[in-house]
Image (cartoon, helix red, strand yellow):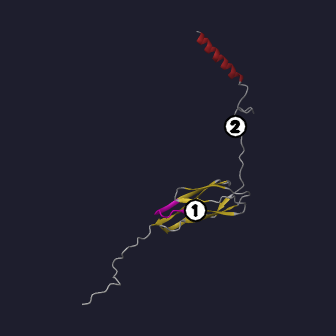
Amino acid sequence: MKKVLLTLGFVASLSTLSFAQEGHSAHDGHNHGAAPATTTVTSTAEIKFEKMVHDYGEIKQGDNGECVFKFKNVGKEPLILTMCQGSCGCTVPQCPKDPILPGKSGEIKVKYDTQRVGPINKSVTVQSNSKTGTQVLQIKGNISPKPVEEAFPQNQPSKGAPTEKK
């Protein structure tokens, strides 16, 4: 019986505490432990690429797999590239480390491993403080295998060997 009375007393005291809080609502202007409202600061840096896609076309295995994406900061504050990442290990971008001032240009160099034969369809993700935020550049093309050179050409007469006279 004592346990029942003790439990009822505990429930009654919890009820009293919860009713004491009813005077406030979520929209009464008080901060009820919620995170304060934040304002989003929009950057005035703006990146403009000359091209978003580089097409290698048809190239041979082992050819130069480098290309360049040129861009300009057409915004009003310095442009900072925070990340340049290829979609795989065969696509390696190099981004400028220093901020690009308004009106100035920069470039992202991309090297693709052309030892891999077949179609190319890779991307480079560029993150910056520009209005557009993250942008994706693409490289595409096709790599054909190197022609196989014959160690000993066939069907060619020997030029240095004497011929037999009859």
Q: Position of residue 151 (x, y in %)?
A: 38, 73
- Examine the structure image and report whether residue 4 is included in the region drawn in magenta: no
- How many residues crowd around disc 1 within 10 Å: few (fewer than 14), some, or many (20 or more)? many
Front residue of 115 and 158:
158
Q: Amino acid at mark 1?
A: Val
- Examine the structure image and report whether residue 120 is included in the region drawn in magenta: yes
Q: Position of residue 3 (x, y in %)?
A: 59, 12
Question: In this figure, which residue is indicated by the disc labeled 1?
Answer: 110
Looking at the image, residue 140 sits to the left or right of residue 50; the answer is left
Q: CA distance from mark 1 to mark 2?
A: 42 Å
Q: Which stretch appears magenta?
A: 111-121
The image shows a total of numbered marks equal to: 2
- How many residues crowd around disc 2 within 10 Å: few (fewer than 14), some, or many (20 or more)? few
Residue reaching furthest top? 1
Q: Secondary structure at mark 2?
A: loop
Residue ID at (59%, 12%): 4
Q: Specify which label sits upstream in the sequence, 1 or 2.
A: 2
Question: In this figure, which residue is indicated by the disc labeled 2?
Answer: 35
Task: Determine which quarter of the picture holds residue 2.
Answer: top right
Residue reaching furthest right? 29
Cβ atoms at labels 1 and 2 below 8 Å apart: no
Give the quarter of the figure containing the C terminus.
Answer: bottom left
Q: Position of residue 49 (x, y in %)?
A: 64, 62
Front residue of 122 and 99:
99
Residue reaching furthest left? 166
Q: Position of residue 109 (x, y in %)?
A: 60, 63
Give the quarter of the figure containing the N terminus.
Answer: top right
Location of residue 159 with respect to 131 vertically, above or below: below
Q: Amino acid at mark 2?
A: Ala
